[in-house]
Amino acid sequence: MNESQGFRTKPLDPDFRRDPKTGCYCALCQKDIKGEPRFYAHMIHGCFEAVHPEDREIANAMVVEHDNFGLLPVGPDCARVIGREFVYTAEEAAAVREREATPSQSTTQPPPPGR
């Protein structure tokens, strides 16, 4: 585990040699995923690091956009390699996406009165 960036990451060893046959494949090994993905990881720096779920907002603020891939699907074998601590279930990933799509109350400005 690495915390030198101000948030927890786990170094990964992706294998990009496979050529996926479908549009739904593991971001780490590029094996096709049958059915809907059950696991996701927040990947940064070319999929060479996974971000800890509790540090997602910090990573989103600190990692430049072209190096921040966000939540990507991973197969069950790679989810075990990454470790449960750094992997989201499909339900957890859906909840994160929903929260990010909904503007928070604190950042939404009400319209000026009388206009």
Image (spheres, rainbow, N blue to C red):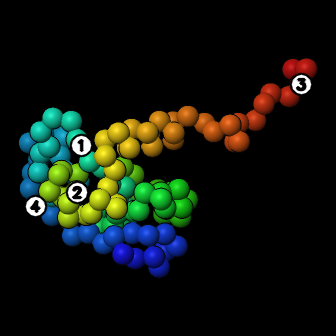
Question: Residue flagged by tag 1: what amino acid is it?
Answer: Arg
Label 2 crowding class (10 Å Cα cut-off): few <14, some 14-19, many 20+? many
Disc on the earlier residue, 3 or 1: 1
Is there CB contact under 8 Å for labels 4 and 3?
Answer: no
Q: At numbered mark 2, what does the secondary structure look like: helix, strand or loop?
A: helix
Q: Position of residue 10 (x, y in %)?
A: 34, 70
Real-space Cα distance between discs 1 and 4?
23 Å
Q: Which residue is mark 4?
A: 17
- Image location (x, y in percent) of residue 36: 21, 36
Residue beneath disc 1: 38
What residue appears at the point 22 percent right and 41 percent down from the top-left corner?
37
Answer yes or no: is residue 69 visible.
no
Q: Which mark is residue 113?
A: 3
With 75 as the anchor, is 108 left or right in this view? right
| Amino acid type shown at disc 3 | Pro
Provide the residue designation for mark 2: 79
Q: Quadrant of the C terminus?
A: top right
- The 10 Å Cα crowd at callout 1, few under 14, some 14 to 19, many 20 or more, is some
Tell me the SS state at disc 4.
loop
Residue 21 x/y as whole percent: 8, 42
What percent of the width, then of the height, locates residue 33? 14, 43
Asked whether the beta carbons under mark 1 and mark 2 sit within 8 Å of each other, the answer is yes
Q: CA distance from mark 3 to mark 2?
A: 51 Å
**Does 5 sit above or below residue 15?**
below
Task: Assign the N terminus to one quadrant of the image.
Answer: bottom left
Q: What's under tag 4, amino acid-wise?
A: Arg
